[in-house]
Amino acid sequence: MTKEHGKAEVLRERRKALLRQMDRIGDLRPGSLVEMYRKCGKPNCRCARPGERGHGPTFILTRKKGGKTVTRAIPDDAVQRTREQLAEYRRFQEVVREFVEVSEAICDAELRERGPGGRIAGKDVASRRPSPRRSTPEGPRRAETPPRS
């Protein structure tokens, strides 16, 4: 076994482990959760006092969709679940990023492992395209010619 072949096998095992991780990923959603406070504008309201943050918090989920920023208010009882979904999305992105890196490394190792003629050292590699059949299983076909007279 060549050094490159051994490395490729280790990478393939890592890729299988990453696929198992992807299988365990739960509900997810992209975006950012923002805690907002706002002032109502009434001069006698507590939010108008100096140093007061304002009314709230109100939680807003922001994300990009079709090139536009989309916002959605998240109810207080769904804030923790939304945070978990956002964390799961970040975990998913990290697993996918590593999966792509490992896959690329496998492809690179296989390219380095190939010897002259595009064959992998120690392996017979079948071509992807079958060659055109030149004869039938019964033997070569011959055009029928009329007998000479």
Image: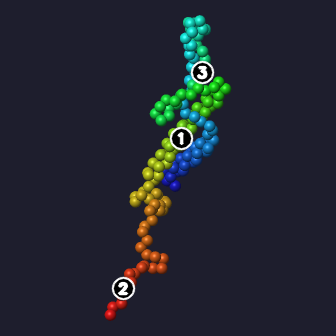
As displayed, is residue 41 above or below residue 133?
Answer: above
Sequence-first tag of 1 and 3:
3
Q: Tell me, yes or no, if residue 10 can be seen here.
A: no
Label 2 SS: loop
Q: Amino acid at mark 1?
A: Val
Which residue corresponds to mark 3? 58
Q: Residue at x 59, y 6 (%)?
A: 44
| Colour pattern | rainbow
In terms of depth relative to the viewer, which is nearer, 88 or 13?
88
As displayed, is residue 34 above or below residue 64?
Answer: above
Dot 2, crowdedness within 10 Å: few (<14), some or many (≥20)? few
Q: Is residue 110 left or right of residue 82?
A: left
Sequence-first tag of 3 and 2:
3
In terms of depth relative to the viewer, which is nearer, 72 or 95?
72
Which residue corresponds to mark 2? 145
The image position of residue 35, as x and y in percent, is 58, 21
- Residue depth check, mark 2 versus mark 1: number of the one nearer the observer: 2
- Residue depth check, mark 1 versus mark 3: number of the one nearer the observer: 3
Q: Amino acid at mark 2?
A: Thr
Label 3 SS: strand
Q: Tell me, yes or no, if residue 119 can be seen here.
A: yes
Q: Which image quarter is the C terminus in?
A: bottom left
The part of the image, by quadrant, that contains residue 94 is: top right
Q: Is residue 93 left or right of residue 27?
A: left
Q: Residue at x 57, y 19 (%)?
A: 36
The image position of residue 85, as x and y in percent, is 61, 33
